[in-house]
Image (cartoon, rainbow, N blue to C red):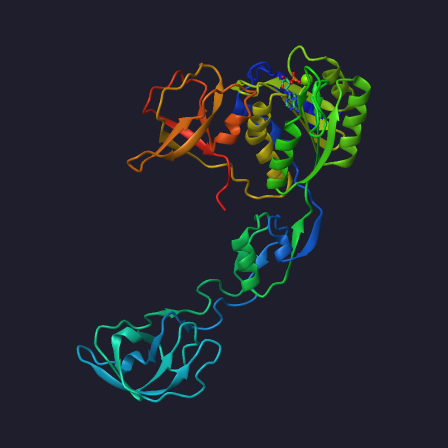
Amino acid sequence: MNDQLKSLRQLSCADDYDPNSMPVDKARDLIARFLEPVAATEHLHVRAALGRVLAQNVVSPLNVPAHDNSAMDGYAVRFSDLKEGAATTLEVAGTAYAGAPFAGVLTAGECVRIMTGAVVPQGTDTIVMQEHVEATERKVTIGSGHRKRQHLRRAGEDLAAGQMALKRGAFLRPAEIGLIASLGIGEVAVYRKLRVAFFSTGDELVSVGTVPTEGQIYDSNRYTLYGMLQRLGCEAIDMGVVRDDPQLLEQAFSEAAANADVVITSGGVSVGEADFVRDLLNKLGEVVFWKIAMKPGRPLAYGKIGDAHFFGLPGNPVSVMVTFYQFVRDALLKLSGRDPVVPLPTFMVPCTASLKKAQGRTEFQRGILGRDPAGNLSVRVTGEQGSGILRSMAEANCFIILPTDQGNVAPGTLVEVQVMEGVV
Ligand code: AMP
Ligand code: MG
């Protein structure tokens, strides 16, 4: 048995960790100890790297901008030519356009008409906005009160040559893709996508396209899981529905672990479920089962099957999504090479109505964050909170996180909300 896993077992059973009432934070910390990011990389064209994780540092090969240039349409002047407290009239010696610099050399008393983005002509050091001059064809008259080097964008002010532009582990969003392109870099190294195999367990489940008989229900967990995995940039390997049959399950677990970095299942981990899932996983790998002190989503299994990480999520559709957001998301980001892994942001807002909450567990109620008629942010709960009511997730845009010691919540109380989507 892997020593690390032995220690997971021991930790999970240690006095201060009650595996029958594991606090959310403890479970997160325990999982985090086992996460080694993927190492393999591939080289991609900068556009194809959108949504991927950078596997190299990107150091700027040049100054951005490359030259001092004008931030305004106006006139490039020598500050020393401007009179203090009086107007100055200068000769216009030529024009500098973005992409077509002024080639001449200025003498005292001359200035250059300049466009935004044009290289600041040699000898000039200050830009006067066109709105602040009186211009004739060959001359401009400039009032007093200008500052030396005003309206100049300095060479290297965005990034200096040799400066770190992006660090290994950065998530490549549109801004990062643009930044890389601005350095003239056309290809970058990214980590390979994390391979995540998932399947649903349950005799009662049928897939879309099959007509359910009495007592059968449509499998929705494979759809929510697929969606969440796609959003995280993982390669999602859908293995379908597996019946509650030890042989079929063993086959599915082995196949999944052989083909993927991570295996995620839903259903079959609650108390009273056929114990063969537990026995099977203990035979195939090292898995600990916890009852997390949370609602929804109490039962959760974590461990390893061979080299693959395993997350056994509960069966109820809302519990699947909540446990995924609270435990699996950050773990997958870490495994994908993201550094740092930034948890979904939380902040405090008043809640509009009273909330029912039992002490002794963390609750993740589904909320709708919005503005009240006065324009202030507030949150309200989405109707019924049953762990089978997937509609509550569809209506929600945030979780209302109510901590362990919290009891019922009175209207107007500040509560912690966690937005479900990152801000892009
Ligand atoms: P289990 O943990 O397997 O006992 O499942 C708990 C509840 O979730 C049961 O009511 C199941 O029918 C339901 N459930 C389990 N898996 C799915 C699924 N893939 N899609 C929808 N509901 C499910
Ligand atoms: Mg089941």
Q: Can residue 105 be seen in this view?
A: yes
Q: Which of 218 and 160 is in front in this view?
A: 218
Quadrant in which residue 57 is drawn: bottom right
Quadrant in which residue 135 is drawn: bottom left
Residue drawn where x is 64% and y is 27% of the image: 221
Q: Position of residue 271 (x, y in %)?
A: 64, 12
Q: Is residue 29 visible?
A: no
Figure disc tally: 0
Q: Where is residue 181 in the image (x, y as percent from the top left)?
A: 57, 62
Q: Nearer the viewer, residue 343 or 225?
A: 225
Residue drawn where x is 59% and y is 13% of the image: 20
Q: Residue furthest left?
A: 85
Q: Nearer the viewer, residue 88 or 113?
A: 113
Q: Position of residue 224 (x, y in %)?
A: 61, 32
Asked if residue 335 lies left or right of residue 340, the reply is: right
Image region (quadrant) for ligand 1: top right
Q: Where is residue 10 in the image (x, y as percent from the top left)?
A: 65, 19
Q: Which of 110 and 29 is in front in this view?
A: 110
Is residue 396 shown above or below 179?
above
Q: Which residue lies furthest to the top in this view?
A: 272
Residue drawn where x is 54% and y is 43% of the image: 340
Residue drawn where x is 34% and y is 70% of the image: 151
Is residue 157 shown above or below 124?
above
Asked if residue 189 lies left or right of residue 137, the reply is: right
Say which quadrant the N terminus sits in: top right
